[in-house]
Amino acid sequence: MKNNFWLFLSLAFILSCSSNVGTDQGKKIFKYNEAAGISSLDPAFAKDLSNIWACNQLFNGLVQLNDKLEVVPCIAKNWEISADGRTYTFNLRKDVFFHENPNFAKRKVVAADFLYSFKRIVDPKVASPGLWVFNAVENKAGNYAFEAPNDSTFVIKLKESFTPFLGILAMKYCSVVPHEAVEFYGEDFRKNPVGTGPFKFQLWKESKKLVFRKNPDYFEFEGENRLPYLDAVSVTFLIDKQSAFLQFVQGKLDFMSGIDASYKDELLTRDGKLRSKYQAEVKLETQPYLNTEYLGILVDAEKEIVQQSPLRFKEVRQAINYGFDRAKMMEYLRNNIGEPGLNGMIPKGLPAFQNDKQYYSYQPDKARKLLQSVGYNSQNPAEITLVTNADYLDLCKYIQHQLNEIGFEVSIEVNPAAALREMKAQAKLNFFRASWIADYPDEENYLSLFYSKNFCPDGPNYTHFKNSEFDRLYEKSLAETDAEKRQVLYQKMDELIMEEAPVVVLYYDQVLRFSRKNIKGLGSNAVNLLDLKRVEKIN
C-alpha cells in the first residue's frame, strides 16, 4: 500500500511539472495548508503558530521583527526609552487605517486604539492567554500604566527595566484592534476580524477554507511599491499530512513548513537535503529554529510523586542525559534536521548559545556509574515512566531502548497533546516530553522556565526548578542593559540548569520551508513567522 502511494505521488509530480499553476483566473493567490487548524482570528488568542500565522496577515502592532529578529518600526515610526529603562514612548504613524467593514466606517488608527487593545488583553473577562506579556508593566490594583496623551503618542511604563520588552511588543497579542468592531461582533470577532494588516478578511468556512484578500490601503511600501504584492491568501485545512504533501507536489499548494514522518524520506535525503527529483520545481530554505525540544523532570521535593521517584536524585537525571546517543537519534529519526541538544537549554540562533561547550555527550559507562552511586543497576533498575504524545513516540522509544541497556527500566505512556499539557501544568508528571518555542527572541524567554517565581500553572516553570543562585542571576539579568554582560549572565544560568539537570535537552530544531519555484520573497526567520506582505507569485 505504501509503495503504491509513492508511485502515485511520483506520477503526480511528473504531471505537475508540465502544468501552469501560477495563478487562479489571473489572480495571484498564495495557498497553504494548515493541518493543525485555526481556532481564532482574534489576536488576543494568537497563542498557537497556526493562529499567529493567520493573524500576522491581518494585524499590526507598534513594532515588528524582521527576518534577522531585529525589532523594527511598524505602526510606531520610532520610540524613545527613558534613561532608567522604565518608560517607553512611541510616536505613531498617521497614515494607518483599519480595514473596510460593511458595519462601520473606515478610520485612522490613533493612540487610544492601542490603549483599548492593550487593556483588552489584561482584562480578566477576555481571558486572553497573552495576559502575561504585560507582566513587566507597572500595575496598581489592575490599572496598567498605558497612556495615550494624544492621537500620535502612546506611552508604557514598566515596574523596572526589562530589556526584552520591545521584542515582546512584536508578538501578535500586542496588535491593535478597533473597539467598534470588537464591541459590534462580541465573541464573534474571532471569525470577523478587523485589523490594519496587508490582507483583510474575506471568508472562513471553519475546518474547510480561509481566504484573505489584498488590503489596497496598506501603509507599508517597498521602495515605491505599496505592499502587498499578492492578490489573496487561501488556507485549506487538510488534516492528513500525506494528502497535503501530495497537493504541494501537484502545485495546488505554494508552500509547506516542516516535515512529517509520512513523507520525510521521500522528500529528503538522510542528511536533510532535498532529493534531486524535486529540485527543479521545489525550493528548500533552512535555518536554526528557536525551538528547544526536551524532556522535563519534576524536581519539586515537596511533591509526593518526586519523593518516591528515582528522578529525585541529580545523579539519575544526569545519567539519563549521558545515557543515549543524540547524534544517531537525529540521523535515523530526524534526517539530521536540527542539531543534537548538547549545548544547554538556550537554542542555536541566540547569542548566548554555547557552541564550544558540550554538557552531555553519549557516555553510557559514565551513566552506569552515576546510577550505581545511588544504588541502581541492571539487577535493581531505576524505574521511571516517560509521558509523551503520539507525535514523539518514535523518539521516546529510541531513548527508552538505550536507557534500558544501562540500568533503567523506562515505561512509556502516550497521552493526547491537550491532556499532556494539562497534566504538565498541574505538576502531575514526573517525566514528560516538552518543547519551548521562543515567544520573543531573547534568551530570557528560555531561562524564565526555571525561575522559582514562575511555578506552573501560573508560569512556565513546569519542572518546579528552584535554585537561589539561579534566581539571583536571573533577576540581575532583567535590569542589565549591556548586551555582552547580559549574555554572560545567561550562560551562567544555563550552566546551573545543566548541572542540576531538571531537563534532558534532545535537540535544537530547524526551520524547513518548502515552496514552489515561482514563489519569490518568502524569506525565513528563526521564530518561523509567516510574513506574506513581500511575497510574489510569478506566472
Image (tube, rainbow, N blue to C red):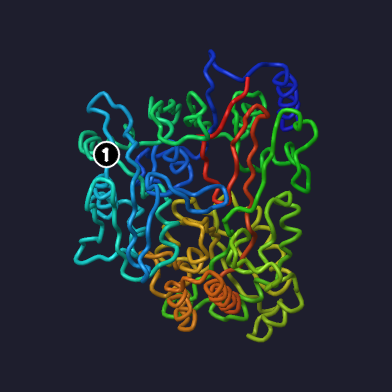
Give how far across and how far down residue 363 sits, in percent.
75, 74
The residue at the far top in this view is: 25
Is residue 98 placed above or below 419 in the rendered structure? Answer: above
Front residue of this view, candidates 199 and 500: 199
Q: What count of labels does the image hold?
A: 1
Name the residue located 29 percent from the left edge and 63 percent from the top edge: 157
Residue 314: quadrant of the picture: bottom right
The residue at the far front in this view is: 224
Name the residue located 60 percent from the left edge and 41 percent from the top edge: 523
Q: Which residue is mark 1?
A: 178
The answer to whether residue 217 is left or right of residue 189 is right
Is residue 500 placed above or below 214 in the rendered structure? Answer: below
Classify mark 1: helix, strand or loop: loop
Q: Residues within 10 Å of mark 1 (few under 14, many from 20)?
A: many
Give how far across and how far down residue 212 sits, in percent.
43, 28
Front residue of this view, candidates 152 and 294: 152
Residue 265: quadrant of the picture: top right
The residue at the far right in this view is: 276
Quadrant housing the C terminus:
top right
Residue 160: quadrant of the picture: bottom left
Q: Amino acid at mark 1?
A: Pro
The answer to whether residue 47 is left or right of residue 145 is right
Quadrant housing the N terminus:
top right
The answer to whether residue 482 is left or right of residue 94 is right
Is residue 457 placed above or below 246 in the rendered structure? Answer: below
Give how far across and how far down residue 312 sits, in percent.
53, 79
Name the residue located 40 percent from the left edge and 54 percent from the top edge: 169
Name the residue located 66 percent from the left edge and 39 percent from the top edge: 262
Front residue of this view, candidates 414 and 452: 452
Give how far across and how far down residue 360 sits, in percent.
69, 72
